[in-house]
Amino acid sequence: MNEPQQPAPEQKPPEPPREPSLERPRAGWLFLMILAVILASDLATKYATFKFLGASIFLAPDGTPTLTSSSVYTLFPGLALEAALNLGAFNGWFAQLPWLLIGISALALPICLYIVLKSNHRPAVLVVALAFISSGAVGNLYDRIIYGGVRDFIRCSIRIGEQEWVWPNFNIADSAIVCGVAMILIREWYLARRARTASAG
């Protein structure tokens, strides 16, 4: 007499790999180490480049921070060094509201540090991203307080024929902020995609 066959047990879909995370002390130390390295790099490159180009900052008779003229030192086509003083945010936005920009920059570090330390575990990518954003904000905050504007020196351009398109000058701090925001956006996109895949499976 044949025994009835038992139904095969349902196989659960494999759990997606967990996101690498750090315990609170390690997350805090990693955050501070990245912050220190990027901040030191930002301030050192600003100082060295402005000195190399012979550019200095002075106050005009009306009290406006002003930069002496700067030459353009080409590293290779499309990338050069050129001193610039940005009194606003990106491309000079909000130049008439310096204290607003100082306030926003001053809030970045405590907010990011709170996010890193408020939980016993934090995703490693998020810790790195917030450290990048904080270091950039602090580097530019230093410039706004000391010089009245942000020192920029990286000049990127694209030349097609006789026409040259120049991106607004920037610095290491700006690059760190952009990289940090990009890491957060890519992480959010990846998590959303993984959640959709898990629900569909």
Image: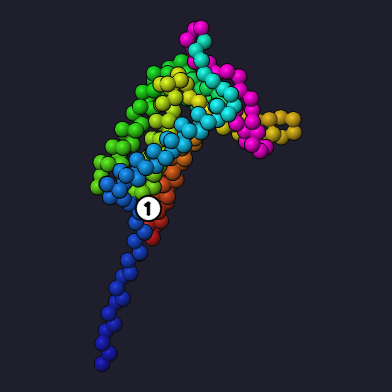
Residue 148 in the figure: left or right of residue 74? left
Q: Position of residue 167 (x, y in %)?
A: 59, 30
Mark 1: few/some/many CA within 10 Å (<14, 14-19, 20+):
few
Residue 20 point in image, percent of width and height: 35, 54
Quadrant in the picture for the C terminus: bottom left
Q: Which residue is mark 1?
A: 195
Q: Position of residue 172 (x, y in %)?
A: 49, 35
Residue 67 found in image quarter: top right
Q: Is residue 85 above or below residue 174?
A: above
Residue 140 image-quadrant placement = top left
Q: Front-most of 12 and 34?
A: 34
Could you tell me which quadrant the N terminus lies in?
bottom left
Reply above or below: 145 against 1.
above
Residue 47 in picture, x, y percent from top left: 50, 29
Per the image, label 1 sits on a secondary structure element best described as helix
Asked if residue 43 lies left or right of residue 154, the reply is left
Q: Which residues are magenta?
A: 61-82
Magenta-span inclusion, residue 62: yes
The answer, for residue 185, to whether it is visible in the render is no
Which residue shows up at 37% across the image and 52% down it?
195
